[in-house]
Amino acid sequence: GFAGVQVPWGDVDQQESSGNSVYHGLTVAVSKRFSRHFEFLSSYTWSHAIDDSTDLQTLLTPQDNRRPGLERGNSTFDQRHRWVTSAVFESPFKRTDEGWHRKFLADFIVAPIIEVASGRPFSVLTGTDLSLDFGSNTDRPSVASSGGVSSPFIPGVNFVPPTVCDVAVPGVTTPFGFGCTGNLGRNAFVRPNFFQWDLRVSRKFYFGEKLNLEFITDMFNLFNRFNVGDVSPLCNPVAGTCSAGEPTAALDPRQFQFGLKLNF
């Protein structure tokens, strides 16, 4: 005969417009208009976005189908800090100035853009249907003060099998962790910070008073910094494996772009 608890139906997905979100933000900007061959704009934003389901691109099924409110946490797009500074430096020299160094440095424009930002949140998932709800997309482990497994990319955190369990059915036993949900919240950890320095250098060459040719060089990620695009969410204490937080994708490396612009 069949051993265990019989389930009379399979997984049932329900979609409804019941999401809840809140956003707090503060923006500070400082600017200097163009004068004396120089201008800049610097802005800083502190923000905190909280919700229980960010959008249709995120995992729609909560870890516990009976308690969707427990999914409330940092939004997938939450970015706590972001600072962007841009500037334009124009050469003070003219091609008609005396001296070879003044003529060489004339008509240059240098424009940097610097961006520093906090990492965005991600959830740690077991990758296994430990809650026995016919899906493994949202199962999360529990965290404890000791034991379990840990990830070198999330130091100081011990992940153990799910510990939030329903009342056991008499006569039915399941392996430790199965039929339970984790006490770890949604989007509990953040990816590494982002830093990038872009730079544009251009120079005009004149052919008469009204005709000039501008050479443009754009450099993206000038210092070729490794910016993490995504990380592994997987940590399964039951299987004894944990790679949560390990980088799995990178954003664009250093790139160059060249252009010509004819002005007349």
Image (tube, rainbow, N blue to C red):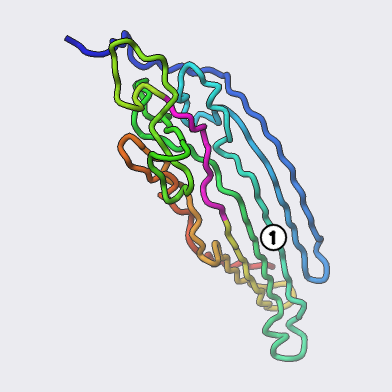
- Residue at the location (40% across, 40% down)? 147
Quadrant into which the N terminus falls: top left
Res. 221 image quadrant = bottom right
- Residue at the location (43% across, 32% down)? 140
Could you tell me residue 25's position as x and y percent? Answer: 71, 40
Magenta: predominant secondary structure element?
Answer: loop
Res. 160 image quadrant = top left
Quadrant into which the C terminus falls: bottom right
- Relative to residue 90, is residue 131 depicted above or below? above
- Residue 86 visible within the image: yes
Which residues make up the magenta segment? 181-194
Mark 1: which amino acid? Answer: Ser
Q: Is residue 192 magenta?
A: yes
Circle 1 residue: 86
Please tell me which residue lies in front, 78 or 103. 78
User: Outermost residue toward the bottom?
Assistant: 99
- Residue at the location (38% across, 23% down)? 131
